Amino acid sequence: MIRPYKGITPTIGAGCYIDQSAQVVGDVTLGENASIWMNAVVRGDVNLIRIGANSNIQDCSVLHGMLHKWPVILGDWVTVGHSVTLHGCVVEDRCLIGMGVVVLNGARIGHDSIVAAGTLIPEGTEIPPGSLVIGFPGKVKRSLSLEEKDSILTYGRNYLGYKEQYLKEMEK
C-alpha cells in the first residue's frame, strides 16, 4: 500500500518494485530500481525517508524516523536484509545490512560496510567506511577486503533480478 500522510505522497523512482503487502507512507522517496518487499514498512510520517537507487528493503523490515530530529537516509546499492529495523539513521552507499539488524537514532554506517545478522548498532554510533560490524552491541571487527566490498553488490544485483521478475509477473 502506498499512501499519503499529511498531504505528502511517496515519490517512486523509475523501475521500482513495491510489493502489494508493503506499507510505504508519507515523505518517502525511492531512487530508481529500488525495491520494497513483502510486509516491509517504510513509514515517512514523522520524518523523511530516502532510499537510494538499486537499494532493496527485504521482507518484514521497518524504516522509521524520529519526530523533528532523525530521518532515515539510505544510499545507493544498499541491501537491507529480512526483519531489519532502521530507526533515524544513515546507511551510506554499498552496504549490506544483515537479517535482524537494529540500527538506532543518529547512527551512521559508512559506505562499503557489512553489518552482520543480529547486530545492534546503538544510538549515535559512527561506523567507519569499509567495516565489518558484529555483535550486540555492534563493534567493528575489522576492515573489509576489496573482495568482500565487491561482494556487497552481488546481493543488490540479485534483488534487481528478482524485482524484474516480479514486475513481469504483475503484467500478466
Image (cartoon, rainbow, N blue to C red):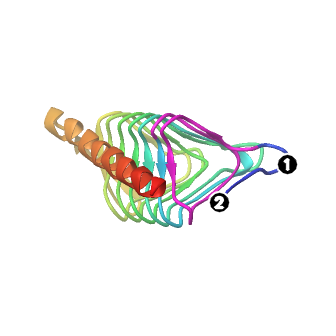
Q: At 38% from the left edge and 37% from the top edge, which residue is drawn?
A: 77
Q: At 45% from the left edge and 58% from the top edge, which residue is drawn?
A: 172
Given residues 148 and 56, the one toward you in this image is: 56
Given residues 132 and 93, the one toward you in this image is: 93
Q: Is residue 121 visible?
A: no
Which quadrant of the figure contains the N terminus? bottom right
The quarter of the picture where residue 55 lies is top left
Q: At 46% from the left edge and 61% from the top edge, which residue is drawn?
A: 84
Q: Which residue is mark 2?
A: 1
Q: State left or right for residue 104 relative to residue 166.
A: right
Provide residue 120's location: percent of width, then percent of height.
Answer: 44, 60
- Vertical position of residue 21 compared to residue 98: above or below: below
Count of all numbered marks drawn on residues in the image: 2
Q: Amino acid at mark 2?
A: Met
Provide residue 11's location: percent of width, then percent of height.
Answer: 65, 38
> Secondary structure under badge 2?
loop
Give the alpha-carbon distance from disc 1 to disc 2, as whole Å: 16 Å
Residue 130's disc number:
none
Provide residue 160's location: percent of width, then percent of height.
Answer: 35, 44
Q: Residues within 10 Å of mark 2 (few under 14, many from 20)?
A: few
Which residue is farthest right? 6
Q: Marks 2 and 1: in contact by CB < 8 Å? A: no
Read off the magenta span: 9-33
Which residue is farthest front? 172
Q: Is residue 32 magenta?
A: yes
Q: Is residue 20 visible?
A: yes
Q: Is residue 65 magenta?
A: no
> Secondary structure under badge 1?
loop
Q: Which residue is mark 1?
A: 6
Q: At 50% from the left edge and 43% from the top edge, which residue is drawn?
A: 16
Q: State left or right for residue 59 relative to residue 149.
A: right
Q: State left or right for residue 40 relative to residue 99.
A: right
